[in-house]
Image (spheres, rainbow, N blue to C red):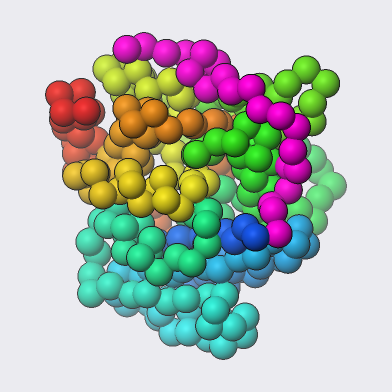
């Protein structure tokens, strides 16, 4: 049942356009809770990235009854960008990360879906972090989204997931083909404990489940909409275990998965939502997936 990322993801495809096709539309699902300060900036950065690359887009904001006014900010943003671009779909309370994606998917009109954090964690490239001469929008611009699209088009993938723990994309570009990625993956702003928890979680899942990817717990991914819908209808987990179950079930169903190295930067505003109960739930989830998938 084991498979290496290279062997599992090797797909020979003819050369094709590595940009979004004219008929493509990308729906971004942003789960939020107390993201009033972050939301205006992330929406602006996403809009800038999509518009500058000629990509049709929309952002689905799934807010879990934030007490800080996140929903009012989302409504204001819808007034600025258009209600067809920023779509607020709130829920009654904190119901879990996995169900937030399920809820948001019901309102996506794009044929591709991107899931990501709203706290800037997924918007810095390693070259920008190491440089002493950069502008703020160079660091925060969601540079990896065009790389995800390029990887998906290059290999006709069903899922592209960001990896913090690999230095190269998987599958690799064909000999003489275009490069994919902005440098090796990495994590910045975490203390040793947080890094050990993340590494340990991935090691546990990789050993038990053998998913064929280097970063099973990441939350920055690109999906074909119909693929995500098919997998979600089969998922039973909630919270952070949901990310793991998606990839494990995708592999069991025969969907193709690729990776692009990303740099993950600790959130700028607000507090991390990872709790002790989520960690315990993750360990239980690994066991349940090993037994049931």
Task: Name the residue: 65% across, 53% down.
Answer: 142
Task: Name the residue: 41% across, 45% down.
Answer: 227
Residue 293 falls left or right of residue 202: left
Q: Is residue 51 visible?
A: yes
Where in the figure is residue 32, as x and y percent of width and height? 40, 65
Where in the figure is residue 217, as x and y percent of width and height? 39, 35
Figure check: 11 above or below 85: above
Where in the figure is residue 64, as x and y percent of width and height? 30, 69
Task: Name the residue: 69% across, 52% down.
Answer: 20
Q: Is residue 275 visible?
A: no
Q: Which SS does the magenta portion mostly show?
A: loop
- Magenta run includes residue 140: no
What is the span of residues highlighted in magenta in the rendered image? Answer: 1-22
Residue 275 falls left or right of residue 219: left
Q: Quadrant of the N terminus?
A: top left
Q: Quadrant of the C terminus?
A: top left
Q: Viewer-proximal residue, 13 or 220?
A: 13
């Amino acid at each position: 049942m084991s498979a290496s990322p290279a062997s599992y993801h090797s797909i020979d495809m003819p050369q094709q356009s590595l940009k979004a096709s004219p008929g493509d539309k990308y729906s971004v699902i942003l789960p939020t809770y107390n993201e009033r300060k972050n939301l205006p900036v992330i929406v602006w950065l996403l809009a800038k990235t999509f518009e500058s690359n000629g990509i049709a887009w929309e952002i689905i904001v799934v807010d879990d009854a934030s007490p800080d006014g996140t929903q009012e900010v989302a409504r204001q943003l819808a007034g600025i960008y258009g209600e067809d671009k920023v779509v607020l779909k709130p829920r009654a309370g904190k119901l879990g990360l996995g169900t937030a994606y399920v809820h948001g998917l019901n309102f996506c009109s794009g044929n591709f879906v991107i899931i990501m954090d709203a706290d800037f964690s997924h918007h810095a490239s390693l070259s920008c972090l190491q440089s002493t001469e950069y502008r703020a929008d160079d660091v925060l611009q969601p540079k990896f989204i065009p790389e995800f699209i390029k990887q998906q088009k290059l290999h006709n993938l069903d899922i592209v997931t960001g990896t913090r723990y690999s230095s190269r994309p998987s599958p690799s570009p064909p000999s003489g083909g275009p490069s994919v990625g902005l440098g090796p993956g990495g994590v910045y702003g975490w203390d040793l404990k947080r890094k050990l928890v993340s590494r340990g979680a991935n090691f546990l899942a990789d050993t038990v489940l053998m998913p064929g990817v280097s970063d099973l717990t990441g939350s920055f991914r690109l999906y074909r909409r119909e693929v995500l819908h098919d997998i979600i209808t089969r998922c039973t987990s909630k919270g952070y275990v949901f990310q793991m179950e998606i990839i494990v079930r995708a592999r069991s169903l025969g969907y193709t998965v690729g990776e692009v190295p990303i740099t993950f930067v600790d959130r700028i505003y607000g507090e991390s939502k990872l709790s002790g109960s989520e960690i315990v739930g993750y360990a239980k989830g690994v066991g349940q997936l090993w037994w049931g998938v």
